[in-house]
Image (tube, grey):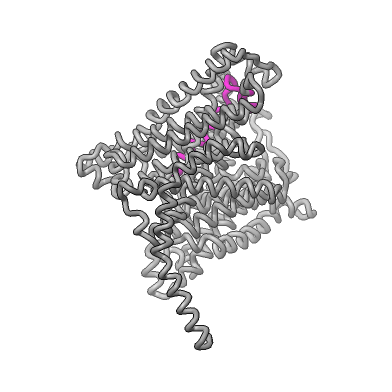
Amino acid sequence: MDNLLLLFQAPPLALQLLIDGVLIGAVFALAAYGLALVWGVMNIINVCQGEYVMLGGYVALYVAHAGFSPFLGIPAAMIALFVVGWLGYRLVIFRIVERDLFISLLATFGLSILLGQFMNLGFGANIETLDAHLGTWFLLGGMVTVAQIKVVALAVTLVIAGLLIAFMRRSRLGQAIRATAQNARAARILGVDTDRVYAMTYALNAAVCGAAGALVAMIWVISPFGGLIYTVRAFMIVVLAGLGNLAGVIVAALGLGAAEQFVGFILGAQFQIAFVFLALVAILILRSWRLRWQRRYLT
Amino acid sequence: MMPAWAKRWRLRALETVARCVPFALLVLRIILRWLPPALLALGIAAPFLLPSFQVQLTFLWIMIVFALCWDILGGQMGYNSFGNIAFFGIGVYTATIVQIGLFQDVAAYTAAAGMQTISLTPDQYFEGLFIGLAAAPVLAVIVAVVLGLALLDLRGHYFAIATLGLGIAAGELAAAWTFVGGSSGVQVPVYPGSLQSGRLLFYFLSAALCITTFITLRWLYTTRFGLAINAIRDDEDKAEALGLHTTRYKIIAWCIGAVFLGLAGGLVGHIIGFIDPREVAFAGASFGVWMILMAILGGKGTLWGPVIGAVIFHVMRELFWTYLFGWQNVAMGVLIVVVVVFFPFGILGWLRRRYPQLFVRDAAQPGAAE
């Protein structure tokens, strides 16, 4: 609780946490948008979302180690993860698309364990980070620091989100994806190749996660088994925002990022992961209470 | 194209096989009838017949308890929980902390992180062991009631994800709580007798727990309670509309799972000898998923399914560890995906679809009854 007092005594510190949280939250928004896309179109909750994020981070890491600019890692991760996602769909996901939701949940959970193990074997169990060689801004006479890479991450997130929205609105494939989300059977009758749409949706989701992972590697750390928490964050954001509510996703993501920073500071960093998972449980419980209250109101 | 003679022989072979099916079914029924006593005898003799596999055999019983407990909710009630591991972890910690706490200062012991050895006399050890084993299910049930009131309102995938979060949150909380050792874990008191006698004791305790679980569930599934939870699985709203107190039944089912998982946890702490919050007590990504996989592999929603699934799964796991060392966890991941995608109904589910006559419930065939 000493840290809580500290926050009130030193307002710049709170500002610092807020800025950090909001900038990190932007990256969560990317993974959450991908999750919402797959959930909405294919009716699958993709539990290996976080593993795609980590995998994207490793791709960026290896691109940078090969001597290229770290920022080249973002498109490289997107392309690599697009291929991974497409393969994942062709090998496993297409078998579970129109099945029981529990089966898809468990199958993607199995995939997430599998991917985690592969990353552990391929890249080692160490926690890794990627230095983007960018400076830090000092505000308010050095009391608040803003790492430039985090601002870049926010900008990249906004660009990718904008491109995605334009793609979904304008392009032929985007229209097909939206049509399939509304009614897969009708789309099929009208000549949409839904299998291809599903494959593209899933691969697109993986690519978005890959970009998020490249950013995570630069502003934070990546590790083979660190994926699940990103899945949970993404799920939580989507539940908070509601399916198909992009503005809500961004607000919820930024809010979650900030909340995490504050809790991590007040209770200590060892409680930060526990907080994320407990927040998930709490949000779902509150959601069900709200629904029950609404039902009571109706009857 | 197949030549005419080959076609004729193929037909004849198929006819012969078809004629043998009723006979084979009869043999199968007789085997099924004598299976439980035979298994029981085998279970008692196993640690003496295969002394080098005692620890693995002990875990086999525990695995069966896992699968059976998951199936109460997942199979019989249709609530797919990823978080049952939380009750197991509570059992692990409670049993050990109570055992230590009866005779020593727990905070000082865990703060030393294994540097301070604990020496209990045999009397103290057994007193602590049994009080600990009694406390473990009690605490697990208390937690289960509180969580059940909140969580069992959720439906479908929201329940699944919430319980997934719960299991991992519990592990992270245990890893952050310094009183129970934090992330460096707790050293369990050492058994005061010889290594061999300790192993045998925990083997038979695990076997007794597993058999008790099985008999309790077999009885429960024949009662009104079993019908009620099956009704909840089939259509919860309709069951509620018909006047069933669904919340009450759901919480009772969740608590029954918690009792046996808590006990299993108390035993596993002593079998492994060291409690790690994330890898042993709240191992959501290993034991937590495996218990689901075992029930599905055998056939969820059946009594024998989880048992069969657990045995096959455990043997496969040990084989992976022996022959695919280094890749064993990858193999487990592949196994999960393959089983879930290709065999979602499991072995007994497949048998029941193929040979429904095997599953006719009658008093003379206790083994064949589902």
Image quadrant assignment for residue B22: bottom left
Q: Is residue B273 above or below residue B59?
A: above
Q: Is residue A221 left or right of residue B176?
A: right
Residue at 22% x, 42% y is A298
Residue at 38% x, 35% y is B216
Q: Is residue A139 above or below residue B323?
A: above
Q: Is residue A179 above or below residue A64?
A: below
Residue at 30% x, 46% y is B363
The kind of secondary structure the magenta stretch mainly shows is: helix
Nearer to the camera, B133 or B332: B133
Residue at 48% x, 32% y is B208
Nearer to the camera, B271 or B175: B271
Q: Is residue B183 magenta?
A: yes
Residue A140: image x %, image y %? 64, 30
Residue B94: image x %, image y %? 51, 23
Residue A29: image x %, image y %? 53, 47
Q: Is residue A247 above or below residue B88?
A: below
Residue A145: image x %, image y %? 66, 33
Q: Is residue B175 left or right of residue B309?
A: right
Q: Is residue A131 magenta?
A: no
Task: Tell me, yes or no, if residue B264 can be seen here.
Answer: yes
Task: Tell me, yes or no, if residue A214 can be seen here.
Answer: no
Nearer to the camera, B212 or A196: B212
**Number of numbered discs:** 0
> What range is drawn magenta here?
B160-187
Image quadrant assignment for residue B126: top right
Q: Is residue A178 left or right of residue B311?
A: left
Image quadrant assignment for residue A135: top right
